[in-house]
Amino acid sequence: MPIAVRPRGAGVIVVAVMLFALAGFTRVGWLLLFDAVLWGIIIISMIMPWLAIGKVSVRRRITGWQGKGMYEGPMAGDPCDLEIRMENHGLLPAVFIGAAYDFDRLGVQAEKQRMFIAWLGRKDAHTTTAHCSFPRRGMYNFPDIKLETSLPFGLFRRRRYLSNPTEVLVLPKVHPVAGLQLLDNSGDTSHYALKARVGDQVIGSRSYVSGDPWHHIHWRNSARTGQPQVKEFEKTPDSAITIVFDIRSSPTGNDDALEHAVSLAASAGDFVCRSQGVVRLISGGINEETTDARVLLRTLALMKPGEGRALPDLMAMTPPFSAVLVIVEDCDAAGIREATRLAAAQRRVSAILLTGFQGNEGSPDAIAELLKSDARVVECKPGEAAKALALLCDPRPGNATEAQAVTAS
């Protein structure tokens, strides 16, 4: 961006022009001297902002978050550390530079959104860390960084925007899960066959990689291929769960229910994956199976509200041998009745009722039918995802009293 004249700069220029005219008319020596000093200040103030910024670059990255080492990025609402590193690649020092990294339009909450550098020597760097948090899951693209200086007298200003593409994947909030009762006696999961380093049955071989035990060498295939080969096993997972919820946009435009559903699915799915289980996620246009918590959380993080399929259609796609966790709003009568039908068909069904998000009375008749079934039912109100998961992990039989209170209203 070219040099911009600030109001005080415009005033000094006007004074210098008037003084020059007055000195030319009166021929007074000290006026000519003072006018020359003013023009010298103006010229220096025009040149210095160009030299002050020079070849400066800025890099941003998230360096710390809760669960780092276990999760690949920060979670929605959790505090994290944003590192901002400014480097001077020019031959001259960069001085009196203000850098603004405005996150307001992203909704990111940060303790500070500006930094000031009084002196940054040639080939030198300055690093600062800001504490921030991301309100919701998803992919965040940081805006350009604005560099600005008015060195040395504040008469002129140079502003420069640095395009530093930075993407941050914010995962859905994962709440602690002690155990899921719907996984107990999970039954026949033999159709979920996994490849593993150790397992129940040898199904083939693969190339040796560092860390493979030598006693698993497949000598016959090694001799045939001329390269070390190790046995590959088939392992039956300990548990399998299918998580189903509706990703369609809320009629009221309030997506809080969806965000709660995603957080609940992430918490339950993360627990199952880390317990060596299989998670099938059915929502919107997604019907995927994984044993990797990172893949599951990334998929959930990138979900966007859309049309998709209704909850009864999604539940019809659930595999027959898997426990089912249904996350449904209390106003979705069709979805609640389909969950009741699954429970009546000898299926292991748990249902989390999202209540209080639409501002209506829900579907008490459909909920009453669900409570009479063999499904395990808990209630989740706004901001109470952790409480709902704790109720879901409660080993005591029967449905939670919170869910029963829904029908009483």
Image (cartoon, rainbow, N blue to C red):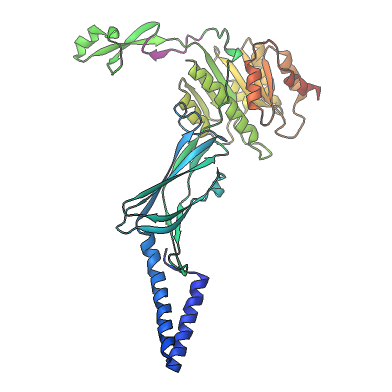
- Tell me where residue 147 sits by quadrant: bottom left
Residue 385 relative to residue 75: left or right: right
Q: Does residue 45 lie above or below 55 as drawn?
A: below
At x 58% / y 29%, what residue is drawn? 262
In reply to whether residue 41 is colored magenta, the answer given is no
Figure check: 260 above or below 345 = below
Q: Nearer the viewer, residue 305 or 402?
A: 402
Quarter of the rendering occupied by the N terminus: bottom left
Q: Quick check: is 190 in the magenta stretch?
A: yes
Residue pictured at 66% horizontal, 28% vertical: 384
Q: Quadrant of the C terminus?
A: top right
Q: Which residues are magenta?
A: 189-198
x then y, percent, for residue 183: 57, 12
All told, the count of numbered labels is 0
- Closer-to-camera residue (80/299): 80
Quadrant in the picture for residue 386 = top right
Residue 336 percent across, percent down from the top left? 68, 22
> Which residue is at the front of the view, 317 or 363?
363
Residue 19: percent from left, percent from top: 47, 85
**Residue 317 in view in this figure:** no
> Which residue, as the protein is rendered here, is positioned at the far right?
409
Would residue 319 appear left or right of 205 to someone viewing this image?
Answer: right
Residue 290 point in image, percent of width and height: 47, 21
At horizontal 30% and vertical 16% (from top left) the residue drawn is 211
- Residue farthest to the front, as pictured: 30
Question: Visible in this render: residue 200?
Answer: yes
Predominant SS along the magenta part: loop
* Left or right: 400, with 120 as reference point: right
